[in-house]
Structures are given as structure tokens and as C-alpha cells.
Amino acid sequence: MSGRRLISLDAMGGDKAPGVVVDGAALALERHPDLRFLIFGDEARVAPLLATRPKLSAAVELRHTADWIASDAKPSAALRGGRNSSMRLAIDAVRAGEADGVVSAGNTGALMALAKFVLRTLGSIDRPAIASFFPTQRGESVMLDLGANVECGADNLVQFAVMGEAFARTVLGVRQPTIGVLNVGSEEMKGHDEVRAAAATLRAGRLAPQFHGFIEGNDITEGTTDVVVTDGFTGNVALKTAEGTARLYSSFLRGAFASSLAAKLGYLLARHALAKLRERTDPRRYNGAMFLGLNGVVVKSHGGTDAVGFANAIGVAADMIANAINARISQELALLGAPPAGDQAAS
Amino acid sequence: MSGRRLISLDAMGGDKAPGVVVDGAALALERHPDLRFLIFGDEARVAPLLATRPKLSAAVELRHTADWIASDAKPSAALRGGRNSSMRLAIDAVRAGEADGVVSAGNTGALMALAKFVLRTLGSIDRPAIASFFPTQRGESVMLDLGANVECGADNLVQFAVMGEAFARTVLGVRQPTIGVLNVGSEEMKGHDEVRAAAATLRAGRLAPQFHGFIEGNDITEGTTDVVVTDGFTGNVALKTAEGTARLYSSFLRGAFASSLAAKLGYLLARHALAKLRERTDPRRYNGAMFLGLNGVVVKSHGGTDAVGFANAIGVAADMIANAINARISQELALLGAPPAGDQAAS
């Protein structure tokens, strides 16, 4: 947790940029006073926002660019034409060693394409993954991939397991994180070739003592394992299904409280407790999807979030930097082929 | 809704068989007095249960068999060795025209394998699918496949769309059901080849006016479309993720109400309204997964359900029979290659 942490910010990404980015940075700075920011964006719009925030201004270097990546730009167009965009320059700063990590609320596909192109993948990682942590019955777990890779081979899934394990151990602080591979049943013969081959590799390798085996959709929120490994198609659908279900439940709950006078009174009495429930399930609390498997810390904020959500995304990047997540992933990757830790100790 | 509806029941399937099966049948008979049952199971265990229920007994023919399919039996073993099992005989009764449909709370894989073997697929259907309806912000929708087919080609997805549409129109009573294909984004270029090819076929065919396009995980509970089409891997994970999320939210809610005296009092005042919420999200209400695409009505009850849930599964089978669901699916399949209904009217 020591040392300078300098985060570059894409001021022009997201639905409410640059206001939310500046307000979010101010909030993050209150929580983590050691943070410093390199902000890329339109000076004419960003400078006036900074002018009203002297404390933040003292922690910020603003670099002007008039270009940004549109929210509907194709990744290929961002690669070709986005050389001077706020997003690209913010990533370039990480590559140049000027910043320790980057946060953007812009176009996900463009951010992944630019980050892969500029930062390159980490060590033997074949494909980076998008990861996020979320609340469970037991605490918090991390799931990946959430949409970077629509189709994944067994090797990709195994690498996701390694990255998720390193994340849970360092950033979430779980001593021996357990790992599950998402499937349609827990028996060994269930599922398609990719999940079966990935499970076989994990069962035989160094992470075997932490490998729980196959898990099912309900295990995600039950917190059966600390790490949930899946392909980007399934992971993306699962994440959004969970979000939608929480909203449905919440809307049913509002309906119930509005349905009678007694229920309305009951709501008034319970409102402080219910506010805590809202806080616990607040999507802003879990804002900040991590791009794992790159030579650099990259965090994607939800495009529609507010300053609280954006500050949380910055907090995620700050945690990843403080925990040297990429060094941990590299170490694990180097050991991947080695026998389980138990066997090693015995030899 | 007219005429006899005779449903064969596998008395020995499920965690609490045969008690739940008999109690569920009694409850279903109260709701649908025209139902008649052909029950297959161990006479020594089932007959005493029927003896205490004279009204049900008058609507039941019990056929003895000492055999049943174990909950962990492999589908291949059920096919080879299950000839005299209660599940197999209950399906045989549909094939023989003795029953109009079958309900079992037994082993899902065995039920699908036996049903496919005995009843064969309907018309040009390549692979049957498991479908279920569920609550949304707008009412109810139906999703398929939920796990029968881990890998699906574009043709399978298109057939699922046809079957889901026929189900929503007849059993759910939606006049022009809308159809969505589950994907990781709504843009045409998103996703893998199978979903893109399925969408292209649906956009060009007779169901085009009802085809909404791609939907995402959150659209499932938002009720964006009446029919959600997906492969069995994704559908199974999405369904179980939704169930898990509802349980998580519900447990957070219980925690909130227990967290202070005011909240406890609030709960007491709101408890009638909250009971309605519980009812609305009660998994038993949505018990009964439909196997669509077979020459016969087959409904799978959750193995752990109680009599209320089992009665609902029987109700689903009764609705499918009353609405001649398979005749509707056959009609739609025959028209699949035809141009959209609008074009037809113009010619």
C-alpha cells in the first residue's frame, strides 16, 4: 500500500463525461489521498471542472486532446483512427511508465482492443479476460471472463483460473482461493469438451488443491468458490442475468411495500435497514471491471455510472496496483506446469 | 379445454416419491377436476397412499412396477436397463395413446433420453429442448433450451424459436409473441457464428415480424421478448444464476429485517404484502420444465419439489394438452420456410 500510485484517466469516456470522471477522481482522492492522476481530455471542458476543485487539481496533471473514441465505434476503427484519442493516450501513458494503471468509462470493445495493442498480453497469456467481483452468500467472489472472449479453448479457461486465483488472493485477500469452472452440472462428464479439458488440466496441476471442480449458475451467488471461471459468452449472460434478476426482485419489493397502508408503514419503520440492503446490492459498489492478462492495470467503469461508481472503479485500479497483481499473475503462470504445491513440499 | 385429459405419472421419480407425486396429483385434481391419471410405481408403496384419498383414487388407474430409474443413473443405462421402470412405462403409455402426456420428477437426462427414444422427435425437429416460463417485469416469458443441448447449431436455435413461439402463443396466450436470441450485445455483429446465423434466418423468415433480434442477460427478467432463445449451456447457467440471485436477494432482505427492532416491527406490518412477494417469486409456481419437440407432452418436475410444485407441473402438462401444443408446433414448422405473414397477405 506504499508509494505513489498514478492513474491515468480517460476524461472523455462514458455517458456523463467528463463531469463524472472529474467528480469520481475527487471522491477517489478523498478515500486514497496518495493517488495522483494524469487526465486526458478536452482542456476546454475539463479545466473549468478542475478549477472549482483545488485539492484535486493539486493531484492532477491535465493533458489536452480534442479527440475521443465514440461509444459505438468499432474496435478496428478505434485502432486505426484513435491514435490521439483520450482513451489511447491514457493507455499509452501506462505503456510509457508514466502511469501505473488506467481507468476509462468508454467503449469496452475499443478499450480492450487498444489495451491489447498498446500494452500486449502478459507473459504466456493468450487472451486477456474481463473480470469483476460480486456479492455472494459468503462474501465476495470474482468471475471471468465476462465478455472479452466469446469463444474460449481449454487453455484460455485454465489461464483465466490462474488470473482469477491471483486476483482473489491479492486484491480480495483470500488465503487459498477456491476455483470453480462454470458448467451445467457438477459431474465430470457434464458439459462440452472445453470445460472438461480445462477441468482435467486444473485437477492435474499446481492449483489442484484449490480446484473445486464444476459449479452451476446458482453457485455464483452462493459463493461456492472464490473464483468462477467461464467463457466470455456465458459469463456475460450470467452477469447481466444476475443484474436483471436483482432489479426484478427489487421492483417486486417496491410493489409489495406500496400495496397497502400497513406495508407503507412497515416500510417507514424498516427504511434504515432497507437502505443498508440497497447499499449492499448497489451496482455502483461493484463498478470497475478488471482487464486481466495485460502488461498494465486497466479498469473499465460502467459507461452510465455516477461519480460514486467511477470512484469505485479508480479504487479497484488502485488496489490492483498496490497488490502488484500482474507480477503475481506472472509468477503463477511460470509455475502452472509444476506439480501441486503439496507434492512439491514432499519432494 | 374440453375432453378427457389423461396424464401418466412416474410415481417413483423425485426426492420425495411417491408421496409428493400422489399428493400433487390430488391437488391438481382439485384444480382441474377433468383430469385422470395413470400412475406407474410400486403398488405396495403407492396403493396405501391412494387408499386414504378416495376422490383421487376414483380418477386414478395404478399400474404396478417394482423398477425405477435411479436419480444418478446415466441416460445410456436408463435406455438399456430401464424397460420396466416407472418412468419408461409412463412414457410408453403416451406412445401407446393411453395417456395424453407424462409428468416425472425423476432424473432429467434419463427422462429426455427415454422420451426421445420412445416418442421420437416431432416432424423436422432435430433436437428437443427444455423450456420453462418465468416471471418478468412485464408478465411471463418462456426460455429454451435450458440444458438438453450443450452445443447447438443455428438450425437448432431457429427450431427453438419456432417451438417457443408456439408455446407462448398457445399456453401463455400471447397474441404475437416476440422472440429474442440471447447474446452478449444487441448489435448484429456480436456473438459467435451460431447466434448470428440463427438471427439471419429468423430475420428473413416467416417469424420476422416477431423477431426482436439479439437480447442480453438482463432482458430475460425485463421481459423484453416473450420468447428467449439460447443454447442449453447458456440457458442452464442463466436460469440457475437467476434462481441463485433471487435467493441471495431474499437472504439479504431477511438479514435487513432482522437487523433492528424498528425493522422487525416494520416486517410485522408489511408481512401480508411480503407474503405476496414470496408467492410471486416462489420457485414452485414455475415448476414444470417442458420438453418441447417430441411426439407427446412431457413435463419434468423439479426433483426436490413438494406437492404444490408437483401439482403445478401437472398443470403445465394439462395446459399443453388442452392447447394441442404439438399440433401448433408442427404447423409452424411446415411454414418455416415460407415468407413473412405480411408478404403472404400482400401476394
Image (cartoon, coloured by chain):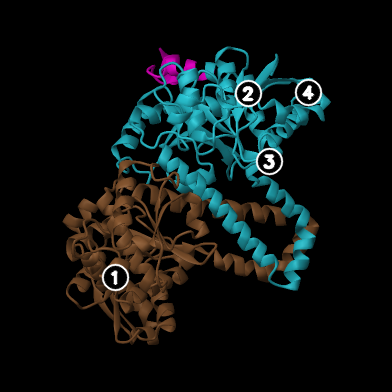
Chain colours: A brown, B cyan
**Label 4 sits on residue:** B57
The residue nearer to you, when weighing A176 against A42, is A176
Q: Are marks 3 and 4 on the same chain?
A: yes
Callout 4: chain: B
**Label 3 sits on residue:** B306
The numbered mark at residue B16 is none
**How far apart in space, not on screen, are marks 3 and 4 (Cα)?**
20 Å
**How far apart in space, not on screen, are marks 4 and 1 (Cα)?**
67 Å
Please name the amino acid that badge 4 sits on. Ser
- In the image, residue B343 lies in the stretch drawn in magenta: yes
Q: Are marks 2 and 4 on the same chain?
A: yes
The numbered mark at residue A346 is 1
Label 3 crowd bin: few (<14), some (14–19), many (20+), radius 10 Å: many
Q: Which residues are magenta?
A: B328-347
In the drawing, does residue A223 fall left or right of residue A232?
right
Please name the amino acid that badge 2 sits on. Thr
Mark found first going from the N terminus, 2 or 3: 2
**Which quadrant holds the C terminus of chain B?**
top left
* Tag 3 near tag 4, CB within 8 Å: no
Who's the residue at 44% across and 71% down the image?
A307
Who's the residue at 72% across and 49% down the image?
B276
Label 4 crowd bin: few (<14), some (14–19), many (20+), radius 10 Å: some
- Tag 1 secondary structure: helix
**How far apart in space, not on screen, are marks 2 and 4 (Cα)?**
18 Å
**Label 2 sits on residue:** B65
Mark nearest the camera among 4 and 1 is: 1
Query: What x and y, as percent, mark residue A193?
Result: 31, 42
- Tag 4 secondary structure: helix
Q: Is A243 above or below relative to A56?
A: above
